[in-house]
Amino acid sequence: MKSRQEALALLHEYTKSESLLKHALGVEAAMLWYAKYYECSEEEQQKWAITGLLHDFDYEMFPEPTAPDGHPFKGNTILAELGYPDDVRDAIMGHAAYTGVARETQMAKALFAVDELSGLITAATLVRPDRSLHTITPKSVKKKMKDKAFAKGCNRDDIRQGAEELGVDLGEHIAHVIEAMCAVATELGLDGESL
């Protein structure tokens, strides 16, 4: 397995957008949280985190979801050439429903479950007066989730389906991802200090 430093360098090579870089860090944190929750070994925890970090690394350069030249197909090819393991690449392919790749591992299910949700939590935090992950609640995220005009790009059905696939109550799942993202709140600019 590649190191986080190598994965981070790859992310920065392909991604320049600050919001996409922050999204990668948020998903990485959520994946690490779930790897610990499922009592994975330290090696597996690193693998889960790197999978989260790299899940969208090709999106900015190859945004069109058309095989084989778009996200995540292009990224999958790049990761294969770099020697990333099949389970990492399968999880990344599976996080985009349109690829048709089944989510068969717990890691793949977790990636799908945290991806859209981390984006919704970020959006919900950004409109708060304090812009702090430390004060947002699952209840307030659920309220924003019901508002179809808010963060239209976040797929609510994927969020619900992700929690179901993990076998976790939606409210608990939201709480877990908030807790995970709080660990990197400063890097995400969501610590309330960056006002």
Image: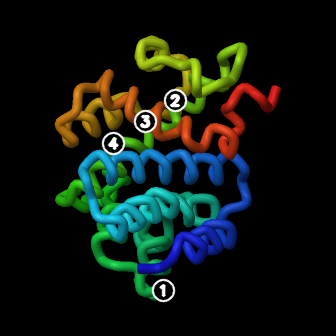
Cβ atoms at labels 4 and 3 below 8 Å apart: no
- At mark 2, the secondary structure is helix
Q: Position of residue 104 (x, y in %)?
A: 17, 59
- The quarter of the picture where the C terminus appears is top right
- At mark 3, the secondary structure is helix
Circle 3: residue type: Val
Spatial CA span between label 4 and label 3: 10 Å
- Residue 164's place in the image compared with 16, above or below, is above
Spatial CA span between label 2 and label 1: 32 Å
Task: Name the residue at 44% across, 59% down.
Answer: 49
According to the picture, the residue beneath numbered tag 4 turns out to be 113
- Whether residue 22 sits left or right of residue 171 in the image: it is right
Sequence-wise first label, 2 or 1: 1
- Whether residue 165 sits left or right of residue 24 in the image: it is left
According to the picture, the residue beneath numbered tag 1 turns out to be 82
Spatial CA span between label 4 and label 1: 26 Å
Task: Name the residue at 68% across, 31% down.
Answer: 191
- At mark 4, the secondary structure is helix
Sequence-wise first label, 4 or 1: 1
Task: Name the residue at 60% across, 44% down.
Answer: 184
- Whether residue 83 sits left or right of residue 26 in the image: it is left
Circle 2: residue type: Ile
Sequence-wise first label, 4 or 2: 4
Circle 1: residue type: Leu
According to the picture, the residue beneath numbered tag 3 turns out to be 177
According to the picture, the residue beneath numbered tag 2 turns out to be 121
